[in-house]
Image: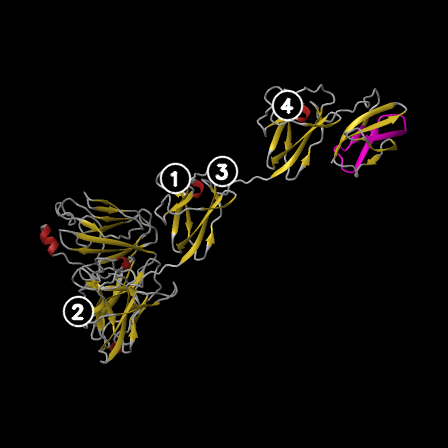
Amino acid sequence: MKSKQLFFFNAIIIALLLSVVTFNARAQSFIFHSEFVNAWSGPGYNFVNDINGYPSVTVQATSTDDEFIIEADNYYNKWDNYGTCTVNVVTPVVFYGNTPAFDPGNSFLTDSAAIGKFYTARIKNVGYSSTNIIIMETDSAPVTFGSIAPVTQTPAVNAVASNTPVDVMVTLDQIKSLQERVYIRYTNDNWATSMAAEVVFANASDIVGHAIIPAQAGGVTVNYYAFTTTVDVTIGVGDYDLITLKQETNAGANYQYTVMMPAVGTAQITFQVNMSNENVTNGVFLAGSFNGFSATANPMSLVGNGIYTATITVDTNIVLQYKFVNGSTYEVGNSACGIDDGLGGYNRNYVVPEVDDTLAITCFNECANCYVPAFADVTFSVNMSTQTVSPLGVFLAGSFNGFSATADSMILVGNGVYELTLNLDTTLSIQYKFVNGNSFETGNAACGVNDGLGGYNRFYEVMGTNSIISTVCFNECANCYVPTFADVTFSVNMSTQTVSPLGVFLAGSFNGFSATADSMILVGNGVYELTLNLDTTLSVQYKFVNGNSFEAGNAACGVDDGFNGFNRVYEVTGTNSIIPTVCYNECADCVPVGLLNTYKSDFNIYPNPVQAILYLNVDSKQQQNNFQIINQLGAIVLEGTITKNIGIDVSNLKSGSYFISVTNNDGFMVKHFIKD
């Protein structure tokens, strides 16, 4: 057996197998040896030397148990070389869509494959010191380039003018899989450096695509070739050959064209710079390759709004490099729109056309013009009606004023609302708080962002037009509640009671159930009244008080008061209202004196309350019945004669509390009803 070194140096890459190797449905181990041949400890796969020094093989998985193995053998393994060799898995690696498991001790790289997928392994063998490998997955066998004219260009090779981009058309032999990307790799310095332009296919089913090589100056020679890969090379790669699936290099000669030298002429070019962000003291100058980068040779003229211009006459079809100079201070430059000046900065560059031209205005040291902000009025308003406003006033603090507690004072516009209008940059996203005196809002998590200090800032995206932010309550997300009120008249009939010399009072949830806060007024016939102006959203509970004795209340028309009694209840409506008079401690009004009776028969009335027709159902043999309807003051407001089971029209009666007395030969009886 040869020594390991001799074995390595005499290793020959054998390219005898087809580029795609398929297998039956049994589990497979794709074993890669350092010599890339059918080798010593099991079946291996011959790598094709399609790229010199970067052999590859493509295999297809037919079982979920298929796996890749970088074979290790303590005696024969050429990956290991007695512990001095390492296997480098290339990043980014396309290995079944994830990072494979790797056993560095035994040089095993294994992972389960996906049935039917194709896997292309490419290895860069650099000896025992290090070996690089990448495995790329595709849905189908990697595409090949067209057998006839796979790469063509427009303009033709001998007709590329200076400063003219080249359209490279690439033709494939079959439709590529979704994972494959096609690129043109090109160089204008004989591969000292290179760039890549992606080939774009209009439709997924197309086999013809296009890439653009940017315009080059006259006399420049461009070399290029086409290749496919699963790696996004726009993010930068260190080794194009290692990540290549297939390539088309014009039989190794590469495709090439030389840009024609342009006709020599002159053009007047106007340069413009915006110095509005700079402090200009000793003038502005244009320095460049046309004047030996002199700081003073070409002074620029101020034309307004901080913009300086200079016009020079230069040869056409040449590349100028230049900088603007503020006094004696050169621009540092910007890598995004310049080329390295070799002094730690960047020069601007410009290809002179064959006609006069004016360059776009750029900001000093920037690639584009200086930002000129647009402004809009934004009105902020806060409702302080729930707060005790500090004598110092109300202020607006925010990102626009460094969260100063006193910089922007707000103005009282009425009803506790303070306002302030600021003219703000329309590109801003601002955060802010309202300040009462010197006390900032804590803020509210439901409508704010964490301020980092245990509270929350309000925020607003400034729009392109004037705007008014909805009024909010201090420390709240919405406006403060502004109640509406209505008059509610309460009345109680005390004719069945001995009224205390202290008087009659109304106690309820609206006055903390005070026994003396709201004194009632006698309006006649034992009836006491009081009108209160109450919040229309309230549901009030209340009791009448005789002297200092509260009603016990009545379960039939009250709610438990928690003290073995019952409170009356009333839902305040949106309009003024009169609650029907009730008898003290009763649910209805008292029966007027003189109407009390010993009538043994009974009658019913319905509906109660009533709006229009009041029906009587008299339990009596008498067919003829006399009735009287009496108001709270004891006056008869309606009377007549009816037969039993008939209706009485009460629609003309005013809303309130009434009594109906029915009389016949059996006697009489009284019922109470409410007219809505």
For mark 2, give the secondary structure. Answer: loop
Q: Which residue is mark 3?
A: 386
The residue mark sitting in front, 2 or 4, is 2
Q: Nearer the viewer, residue 126 or 675?
A: 675
Residue 518: give x, y in percent of width and height: 62, 27
Q: Are marks 3 and 1 in contact (CB under 8 Å)?
A: no
CA–CA distance between discs 2 and 1? 58 Å
Relative vertical location of residue 148 with respect to residue 424 in this rendering, above or below? below
Residue at 38% x, 66% y is: 202
Give, as a three-letter code, the residue at label 4: Phe
Query: Earlier along the polypeptide chain: callout 1 or callout 4?
Result: 1
Give, as a three-letter code, the residue at label 3: Thr
Magenta region: which residues?
604-629
Q: Are marks 1 and 4 in contact (CB under 8 Å)?
A: no
618 inside magenta stretch: yes
For mark 3, give the secondary structure. Answer: loop
Q: Which residue is mark 4?
A: 566
Residue 253: give x, y in percent of width and height: 20, 70
Q: Which residue is mark 1?
A: 438
Give, as a three-letter code, the residue at label 2: Ser
Q: Which residue is mark 2?
A: 294
Left or right of residue 66, residue 625 in this image: right
Residue at 14% x, 56% y is: 11
The residue mark sitting in front, 1 or 4, is 1
Please tell me how crowded label 2 is: few (under 14), some (14-19), or many (20+) other residues with Cα within 10 Å: some
